[in-house]
Amino acid sequence: MSMFLLQTRQMWEKLDVLAIALAVLLLLCPNEGAANGTVVSKSADRFWILWERVRYAGEHCPFGQDCNEMRSFSARPLTTNNTGFIFRLFGLQAPLAGPQPLPNTHPDAPSFCEKSSSRPAVEPLAMPKSEKVEVLRGVKALHLDLSNLKSPPGFRQDFGAKLQKQFSDILRGAGIKVVSKEALAQIPGQPVLNVYFSFSDPEELCDYTYSVFASLSQDVLLARDLRIKVAAGVWSFSTGSSARDHKGNEADAILAVAAAFVRDHQRVNSH
């Protein structure tokens, strides 16, 4: 019986030595488990410099209701050994350790998409189509030039210039500003209202006709490929001497475009 107890004691002593040896091995090689499939959590801190540029376009900038803000950003990695200063900028006295959460982001900071994400936050192809008139929502200014319209029979040579003023006054009365071609570049979407006026040969008065076609173009992105941006017609209106609801002369037909534009504009911007 004593021999059995002696052998048992020697066996436990050998197991204790083996356990101590394994513990020392783990201390000397802490990452050994990673090679065997064990997940090892690590973290690294990187710092960036962010440059924000704000441009304003519209009226009563920068804080007016009709002023549009356009923001652009540029980021560069910051390489520095003075990490203590960086952490103090974030309101910390010491570097973050382990899985602790980062400090709260400033509410005005821009949002960034993850590098691994190849799709936008909104899927354009999955979005339902809007009503056609929705393209006028938020349009506060546009470019319009009627000065080169050809004068029809019976009108003076300042036909286009006079209509430019009348047309602009109608739009302005509805809160829509008419800007120059130079100022158009600062307007979001660069909306342009093109008005086309034509009439038949004035010598054949018995068959004389005229027509008006108008189209608003804006910068748009293709839903199937957001990398493609083009200026496209998004709203249109037509009338003329043969239109059933037309009353008046050639000038009235052109001014009917302004009335139709204001009607549709107010329909989507009144709520």
Image: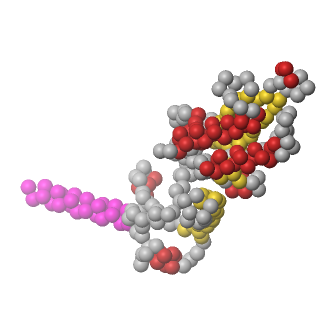
Quadrant the N terminus occupies: bottom left
Residue 69 visible? The answer is no
Residue lying at the far right in this picture: please name it. 203
Residue extent of the magenta highlight: 1-27
Q: Residue at image x 84%, y 20%?
A: 207
Residue at position x 54%, y 59% from top? 65
Tell me: residue 146, above or below residue 50. above
Residue 64, image x, y percentages? 56, 63
> Picture quarter containing residue 249?
top right
Identified at 22% across, 58% down, the residue is 11
Asked whether the viewer can see residue 85, the reply is yes
Residue 91 left/right relative to 111: left
Residue most toward the left?
1
Q: Nearer the viewer, residue 256 or 99?
A: 256
Residue at image location 58% in from the left, 58% down from the top: 66
Foreground pick, 203 / 58: 203
Image coordinates for residue 41, horizontal then vertical, percent: 42, 58
Q: Provide residue 162's location: percent of width, then percent of height.
A: 78, 47
Give the mark count.
0
x and y percentages locating residue 42 in the rendered image: 45, 61
State which quadrant residue 264 falls in: top right
Magenta stretch containing residue 145, yes or no? no
| Whether residue 232 is situated above or below residue 36 in the rendered picture | above
Residue 18 drawn in magenta = yes
Observer-nearest of 170 and 139 = 170
The main secondary structure of the magenta stretch is helix
| Horizontal side, residue 136 vs residue 107: left or right | right
Q: Nearer the viewer, residue 96 or 266?
A: 266
